Image: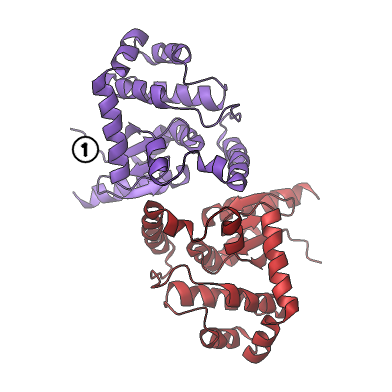
Chain colours: A red, B purple
Amino acid sequence: MSDRPVLQFWHEFASTYSYIAAMRVESAAAAHDVEIAWRPFLLGPIFGAQGLTDSPFNVFADKGRYMWRDMDRLCADYGLPFRKPSAFPRNGLLAARVAMVGMRDGWGPAYVRSVYTANFVEDHDITDAGVLAPMIMAAGGDPETAFRDAASDATKTALRRQTDEAQAKGVFGAPSFITADGELFWGHDRLDQALAWARKNHDQGK
Amino acid sequence: MSDRPVLQFWHEFASTYSYIAAMRVESAAAAHDVEIAWRPFLLGPIFGAQGLTDSPFNVFADKGRYMWRDMDRLCADYGLPFRKPSAFPRNGLLAARVAMVGMRDGWGPAYVRSVYTANFVEDHDITDAGVLAPMIMAAGGDPETAFRDAASDATKTALRRQTDEAQAKGVFGAPSFITADGELFWGHDRLDQALAWARKNHDQGK
């Protein structure tokens, strides 16, 4: 077992700020010597429980306009490419089921980054298996196996349970980070705070 | 005229994160050699236009629970005292009208910081003129004049126009910061980004 603290990284494929977090999380974690546990989940059921049937960025127009401008500025600051997708939010269900398989089989993180790049840089339709297949392969997976396992009851149930777990832990947006002692941090801009908390909590427990 | 860039600081007295921003804004601005233009306003009409009749932190329970925990952590990090008030949100209408007078007469910022401390540290009822009076005096104002002017049509109209201006500029939450070239930044955690933008824009315009 690793002696490094583990930080859970909860991400949803439709979430713009999850894109920034996904691209930054590994290097930031390395700087704190923290291990990242990737946790794909779905925001739809959680927003639904709040009475929202669409992204808050679509429901609240001013907030949405701000978010797109904010993404432009932040990505410029971080040196990340970004293009506002022609469809938002894109349903991340298939991509997330495949991600569950990828996390099990070791090619998850690279695949997840590719899906975010497809959605928020290349403006590709991530609900399309044909779009996902080459990304699975590039990350080291076998698309045929991945889609078969993604469609299994076991994977569907696992993703549903993971989303339930997020909700039970108080997650209400993405990205979110949860430390081993249960501290929740919301937003890509809390990544460093979450990593510092994970590191401090771990060192104090020694 | 000052040659320093000016950053507008839009704040609402019921807003927890505005408290953090109000306490940090002057020292952060000094570090960037930026001047702060304090802009009290009311979120109520803006939330109302979004269909919200209460604070989003009350409407969305998980988000509310997170916010209170986040405030505890952030204030500890910043060395700011903080106590969850027994009433939330407290109506900031009277306090904001008085703030308009204070900004006109030069005792505004000190008064504003006192009101935030009363609400979020001392758990005092900031809707009560008796609570505000000593804070006006401590900041260098005359309470009798302040309350008389705060109740005038001119002040009421000025605050309403300021709130309309916030909305017209895309403000949807507090605190918000707006640079001279119209860039909007939302959240106390964007204060440094906003100051850096204000400074850079100013220096490029020379």
Q: Residue at x 44, y 30 (%)?
A: B13
Q: Chain of mark 1?
A: B
Q: Quadrant of residue B122?
A: top right
Image coordinates for residue A160, horizontal then vertical, percent = 69, 68
Image coordinates for residue B53, horizontal then vertical, percent = 47, 39
Nearer-the-camera pick, B62 or B3? B62
Q: Residue at x 49, y 71 (%)?
A: A90
Q: Is residue B15 above or below residue A182?
A: above
**In the picture, which quadrant includes the N terminus of chain A?**
bottom right
Q: Is residue B203 above or below residue B88?
A: below
Mark 1 sits on what residue? Answer: B3
Image coordinates for residue A14, horizontal then vertical, percent = 51, 68
User: Three-letter amino acid code at disc 1?
Assistant: Asp
Q: Is residue A34 visible?
A: no
Image coordinates for residue A164, horizontal then vertical, percent = 70, 61
Q: Is residue B167 above or below residue B135?
A: below
Nearer-the-camera pick, B165 or A178? B165
Q: Is residue A106 left or right of residue B123?
A: right
Nearer-the-camera pick, B174 or A180? B174
Q: Quadrant of residue B136?
A: top left
Q: Is residue B179 above or below residue B1?
A: below
Q: Is residue A57 visible?
A: yes
Q: Of helix, strand and loop, which one carries label 1?
A: loop
For the image shown, how many numbered marks are present on the structure? 1
Specify few, some or many for label 1: CA neighbours under 10 Å numbering under 14, 14-19, or 20 or more: few
Q: Residue at x 55, y 43 (%)?
A: B59
